Image: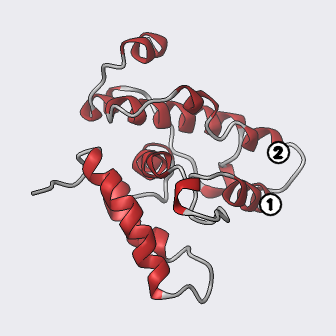
Amino acid sequence: MLIRLFLEKNIKIMDINKFHFKKFKKNERSSFAYWYYHWKAFNLVALSLGAWKFKYLFHDIEKPWLRLFWPYEKVQAYHRTHSNHHVEYPAKKSSDYDWEAMVIDWECSPYTKVAAKWHAVDALPFEMDKLPQGAEFGQSLWLAKNITPVLYKFKLIKGE
């Protein structure tokens, strides 16, 4: 059924709740089971927003493999600094980030994470807090400036 959805690219955001998801605690993440449910939620949200891309089939695929050798904290730190859909990624310019994947990641979090009670719009202030220590106010504005058009594009916030 999931493959048919990928081919048709025809799913609405409210339809996602029809799919079975399992929520994981922080210490359970980066397992193969978590990756599968997160992968499914990420791709379904991308489809529902009309933003699905082939590369999303490989979203976060390295995490369960790294978890075989590293503790969760090291896997998380590595992933966040080597994946351009995270604010911690050390990009040289704004176009180096995958802003759409970042929003999709935030939007799908409540489907698979016990601790995630918010969707993308509500996640923005929380993500601003993740900017490097000593981040200037300008960096928060920079993040909001790049994320806001994606939120409008996906109709997660309404425009004028």
The amino acid at mark 2 is Leu
Q: Residues within 10 Å of mark 2 (few under 14, many from 20)?
A: some
Name the disc covering residue 74, or none. Answer: 1
Q: Of the two numbered discs 2 and 1 on the same chain, state the one appearing first in sequence.
A: 2
Which element type, helix, strand or loop, lies under badge 1? helix
- At 70% from the left and 36% from the top, the residue drawn is 61
Quarter of the figure with the C terminus: bottom left
- Up-down relation of residue 35 to residue 6 (above or below): below
Q: Is residue 133 left or right of residue 158?
A: right
The one nearer the camera, 95 or 46, is: 95
Q: Residue furthest left?
A: 160
Provide residue 18's location: percent of width, then percent of height.
Answer: 33, 26
Which element type, helix, strand or loop, lies under badge 2? helix
Q: How many marks?
A: 2
Which residue position is annotated with label 2?
66
Q: Is residue 158 left or right of residue 61?
A: left
The amino acid at mark 1 is Lys
- At 59% from the left and 31% from the top, the residue drawn is 55
- At 47% from the left and 74% from the top, the residue drawn is 128
